[in-house]
DNA sequence: TGTGTTGGTTCATTATTTGAACCATTGGTA
DNA sequence: TACCAATGGTTCAAATAATGAACCAACACA
């Protein structure tokens, strides 16, 4: 593993519950030597990817990240385009809606809306990357994304995240085939034992999925009729997002096999 | 210079006019060897900071940047808080308004609004870091920011960016002192020969400036009365932003000297 | 067919990263 | 008061990872 990767991995230790981290915490989380970690943190801070609180000496994500996000958003808006659309969706269904993009063999959260209409709601942590085989969004992307990605994930090890995670390659292949037929994915007790979620793929300019929109519901609140409604809302919402991002919807599913 | 910095600098070559760059372009811009650049780009892409177009093989800023920006924004909203406030300001004055945070000895753009009310307008590139000595925002930050920062910038070399850039340390110190008295900074033909801009500091929790809001106007449209109006709007806007970010306004300017 | 691009790879050389041991400061506590 | 266990940070010889000249292959153009 290169030095660059080691340093960039530091940025992934931040989360909703840990927006600031000290040197010792990074050392514990990364398992690396204190001197190494310290130099990495300093170099990240020098480049604006971290900033250090002058008093507490704790580090948090720095202004360079906001700047680069703005650069990407002004040249190729994604979040700004997706956010209002998923906000409308969240308002319609009253549940957590999130949108993620493919990053390697994981999904990288881009935008999420928690309407907060109910007392209990699914809590979404945008710092957490989502596994493809264990989430509805991931299944949608496996079914409609690049063929190479599908092959790699189906071949690789499949970690169990909850009681109903599919961990067998053949089972997963069958599930993905069914998702491709249905055009929508469902995952219950697959990533979290108390959550059911559904997801629909969002396509890029070449008709290959680049990400997915998902609705996540606490298990107790997920009646069949509600879920049918959510599925319909997701199909419509995903189509709107694909269009807004300049994508073209998937072609005939049978063609997907050769993508 | 460390490997991490060399890699991260690649991300700074993107701009509004160059949202995608190829390997050879990175090589030209950085002056480094092709093999080195290539490995840096691959490692950045593996971590989601870049993504490569499958056909053109060009690189652009990746989804990890959006994800990390979301993490920072959900735990400590800056852009989401500032954007509506500067949008209101931009609507009021009808000119470019931008907000930036201190990053090292430069300012890192965080949010900007171009109302587009006039045929000509100042064009803002959020990828470009702003020098402290040559911009109104920078002067505001030098006057009200950390003392150490002021000392370092006043001691260092001051590059000329336009015909009226202050490049002498003593002159700059005097100018900064005047800005501190006035509470607002003005820069004409200092960063761009066709632009006048004014800026007011935004403060952090400890009463030290963390950034600045600025209004930039094409030179021909900058009458004295308009500028007086802009200055008043900036003072009010900056105060609102400071408050919204949980900052505390600057104390007595004389105390600033010891900060 | 030759020339100049482009993106990408290889491997011996070289320079950078690494980490055990070190210091300084703070906060708790016996 | 003295002591212990944290914290953040630094040093420098040893080990490892980064570097870059030379190399492909593909494409475009004349």
Image (cartoon, coloured by chain):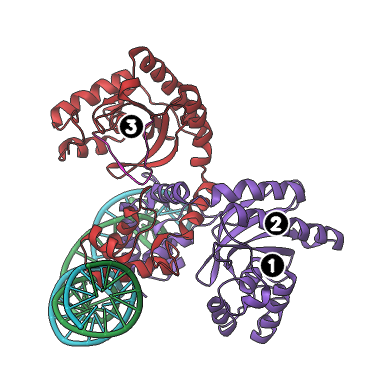
Chain colours: A purple, B red, C cyan, D green
In the rendered image, residue B217, in percent from the top left (x then y), is placed at 36, 26
What's the chain of the residue with tag 2?
A
What's the chain of the residue with tag 1?
A
What's the chain of the residue with tag 3?
B
In this rendered view, identify the residue nearer to me: B256 or B215: B215
Residue B232 versus residue A42 in the image, above or below: above
In the rendered image, residue A185, in percent from the top left (x then y), is placed at 71, 68
In this rendered view, identify the residue nearer to me: A143 or B256: A143
Crowding at dot 2, Cα within 10 Å, few <14 / some 14-19 / many 20+, comes out as many
C13 to the left or right of D17: left
Tell me the magenta residue range: B121-133
- Dot label at residue A192: 1
**Label 2, on which residue?**
A122
B1 to the left or right of B90: left
**Label 3, on which residue?**
B137
Quarter in which the C terminus of chain A is drawn: bottom right
Closer to us: mark 1 or mark 3? 3
In the rendered image, residue A253, in percent from the top left (x then y), is placed at 67, 74
Instruction: Name the quadrant containing residue A17.
Output: bottom right
In this rendered view, identify the residue nearer to me: A215 or A249: A249
Residue, far top: B225
């Amino acid at each position: 593993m290169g030095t660059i990767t080691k340093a960039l991995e530091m940025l992934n230790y931040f989360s909703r519950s840990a927006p600031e981290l000290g040197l010792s915490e990074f050392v514990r989380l990364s398992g690396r030597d204190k001197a190494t970690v310290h130099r990495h943190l300093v170099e990240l801070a020098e480049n604006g990817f971290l900033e250090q609180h002058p008093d507490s000496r704790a580090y948090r994500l720095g202004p360079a990240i906001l700047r680069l996000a703005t650069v990407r958003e002004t040249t190729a808006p994604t979040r700004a385009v997706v956010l209002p659309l998923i906000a409308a969706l969240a308002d319609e269904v009253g549940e957590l809606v999130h949108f993620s993009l493919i990053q390697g063999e994981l999904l990288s959260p881009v935008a999420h809306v928690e309407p907060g209409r109910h007392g209990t709601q699914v809590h979404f942590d945008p710092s957490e990357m989502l596994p493809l085989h264990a989430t509805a969004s991931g299944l949608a992307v496996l079914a409609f994304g690049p063929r190479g990605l599908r092959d790699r994930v189906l071949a690789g090890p499949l970690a169990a995240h909850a009681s109903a995670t599919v961990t067998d390659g053949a089972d997963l292949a069958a599930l993905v085939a069914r998702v491709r037929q249905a055009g929508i994915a469902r995952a219950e007790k697959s990533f979290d034992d108390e959550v059911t979620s559904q997801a629909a793929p969002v396509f890029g300019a070449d008709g290959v999925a680049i990400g997915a929109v998902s609705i996540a519901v606490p298990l107790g609140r997920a009646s069949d009729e509600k879920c049918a409604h959510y599925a319909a809302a997701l199909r419509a919402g995903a189509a709107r997002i694909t269009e807004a991002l300049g994508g073209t919807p998937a072609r005939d599913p049978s063609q997907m096999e050769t993508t």
